[in-house]
Amino acid sequence: MKLKNGGPMTNKIPHSPEKSIATNGITLVYDTFGKRDAEPLLLIQGLSWQMIMWDDDFCRALAAHGYYVIRFDNRDIGRSTKLDAAGVPDIAALFTALMKGEKVTVPYLISDMADDTFGLLDGLEIESAHVVGFSMGGMIGQTMALNRPNRVRTLTSMSSTTGNPALPPPTPEALSVITVPPPSDRAGFIDYFLNMWRILNGRLSVDNTRVVRYAELTYDRGNHTAGIARQIAAINASGSRKDALGSVTVPSLVIHGDADPLLPVACGIDTAEAIPGAQLLIIEGGGHTLPEPVWDKVLGAIVVHTQ
């Protein structure tokens, strides 16, 4: 069933106000779309991106297919707990130590973020859910499938990676937009965000109006540079899941753009090859974003995979 975003079917989808749940020593802020008794589907966002980057219309379209859609702010982002007491990691020193094979200590790991997510499900009294993770969210989803597969009905890993160090690196331009701190003023941040999206968007057209709205919401809900540094540290210190993913038994779908400048398409192919029986969908022209022109293809693939 193809749905028109914002059409009469999706406009009737229930959307909860933002709520919070205490989990794993922190508090996560979340909201939901759809009926509580529908199949639960959990959306996990990537590095620095708040839950609102799962577009409201995208979430409504998913819910219209019969899911109880849950999205949330990861720790250190948006309105969830900020772990400022842990300090700000020296990312350059961290990279140097990891390249030398040295042991590093960071505020938390991807496995801790996976535990956050299980705690969110606990708070919602959900035993298991379909898990859809984007970028770092895909890493969290992979870790959930490895650590507690009984709680993951299906896994969809989007624009993500195994963490295999042999994979191609980001383009210098893409790397710069996620490592250089954004301006602190609202207008400057919006310009920065729009430029970041244009760089990450691959060969697809940019909906400036929609992206500016993402930027405004991100800034107004609270952009947190120190938290982004801690998330970067968690990603890199968690190492490779390449070998471990061979033990995944959860039905898995990998979606990746062939023009992704941050995590090149080889990262998605590597993920699909690492997980036994995983399906692979490559989005032609797709970058490291989820713009409206690809929603129908992505939604269709997720629906087929989860049903």
Image (cartoon, rainbow, N blue to C red):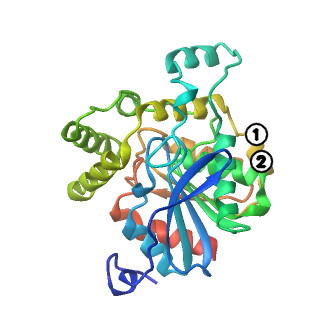
Left or right: residue 174 versus residue 67 is left
At 41% from the left and 28% from the top, the residue drawn is 179
The amino acid type of the residue labelled 2 equals Gly
Q: Can you identify the residue that label 2 sits on?
A: 246
Q: Can you identify the residue that label 1 sits on?
A: 243
Q: In this view, does 86 lie above or below 208?
A: above
Name the spot of residue 229 as percent of width and height, x first: 49, 29
Within 10 Å of the Cα at label 2, are there few (<14), some (14-19), or many (20+) other Cα atoms? Answer: some
Q: Toward the viewer: 8 or 301? A: 8
Q: How far apart are marks 1 and 2 (CA)?
A: 6 Å
Label 1 secondary element: loop
Name the spot of residue 105 as percent of width and height, x first: 67, 22
Q: Is residue 225 visible?
A: yes
Within 10 Å of the Cα at label 1, are there few (<14), some (14-19), or many (20+) other Cα atoms? Answer: few
Q: Toward the viewer: 238 or 18? A: 18
At 42% from the left and 81% from the top, the residue drawn is 2
Name the spot of residue 227 as percent of width and height, x first: 48, 35
